[in-house]
Image (cartoon, rainbow, N blue to C red):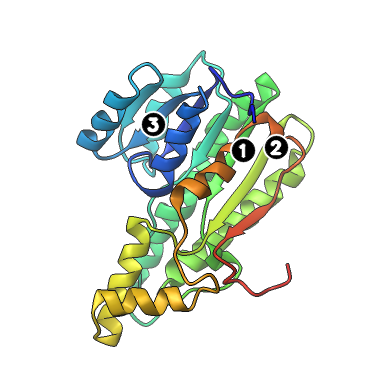
Amino acid sequence: MDLDIKEKKFIVCGATSGFGQAIAKQLMQEGAHVIAVARNEEKLKEFQDAYKLQMEILIGDITQSATIKKLTDLTKGNAISGILVNASGPPAKTFVETSMEDWDEAYRQLVRWKIEITKAFLPIFLKQAYGRFLYIESSAVKQPLENLVLSTSLRLSVVGFVKTVAQEIPDKGITFNVLAPGYHNTPAAERLVVKKAENLKISKKEARSLIQNAIPMKRMGDVDHFASLAVWLLSPLSDYITGQVYTIDGGTVKSTF
């Protein structure tokens, strides 16, 4: 299938790990160009070495205003087709384990920067009458996951923000959508395995087995398969889809809607 993204430029945040890296790779395999943003300079440069002609890099913490400013400066004058709004989440904790400082940091880490980057690039997308915003959140926005009270609470705020903006700007060639993954083979999932092992005083292997057995498909997801949906949503073929939340979780969420 031709996704009509050859030679088009995309921004991928959190590009050196997990979902971000898988999506960046698939975009480039489809012939697109990627501006990859991540904090780890060594990993980012290694990634760039494999895709020299298709990748620009920006080293920095995308949750910081200074990095968003550098990104807007870097892309000035360029047509940007879409942005993958993605970064790591807060630590796995129960509500009792959290402090007020944890909640303040979770807001900064999960909500504030996403609003700021959307505000920064929305005028550009409006001017070119085209653009794709795609936010990676969590299946916890539909059904809470254990030890993720910070993530669940604040990611729900992002979903509310995204769905509202999609209603406010429905006919300008710009779409706003959310991917809500469940357990996949990513570093983030590994942290949840470790947390479960600590809480139950069992081995990581046993904790992973418990998590997988609770998933109807009895396994964690493949990030490359997840990325194929993300790339399609970042393409022109998704022009009739906006304000939607897609759960990819092996059938774990049981709600009808």
Q: Is residue 74 left or right of residue 174?
A: left
Residue 88, how many percent across, how many down?
Answer: 38, 52
- Residue wearing tag 3: 36
Q: Quadrant of residue 203?
A: bottom left
Q: Earlier in the sequence, mark 1 or mark 2?
A: 1
Question: Quarter holding the N terminus?
Answer: top right
Q: Is residue 208 left or right of residue 141?
A: left
- Residue wearing tag 2: 238
Which residue is located at x 64 percent, y 46 percent? Answer: 177
Which residue is located at x 62 percent, y 34 percent? Answer: 132
Which residue is located at x 61 percent, y 68 percent? Answer: 142
169 and 200: which is toward the camera: 200
Label 3 to label 2: alpha-carbon separation? 22 Å
- Residue wearing tag 1: 232
Is residue 129 shown above or below 20? Answer: above
Residue positioned most to the left: 42
Label 1 to label 2: alpha-carbon separation? 7 Å
Label 1 to label 3: alpha-carbon separation? 18 Å
Given this view, does label 1 or label 3 mark the residue nearer the observer? 1
Residue type (three-letter) at the residue carrying disc 1:
Trp
Q: Secondary structure at mark 3?
A: strand
Q: Secondary structure at mark 1?
A: helix
Q: Quadrant of residue 67?
A: top left
The answer to whether the residue labelled 1 contacts the one labelled 2, judged by CB atoms less than 8 Å apart, is yes
Residue type (three-letter) at the residue carrying disc 3:
Ala
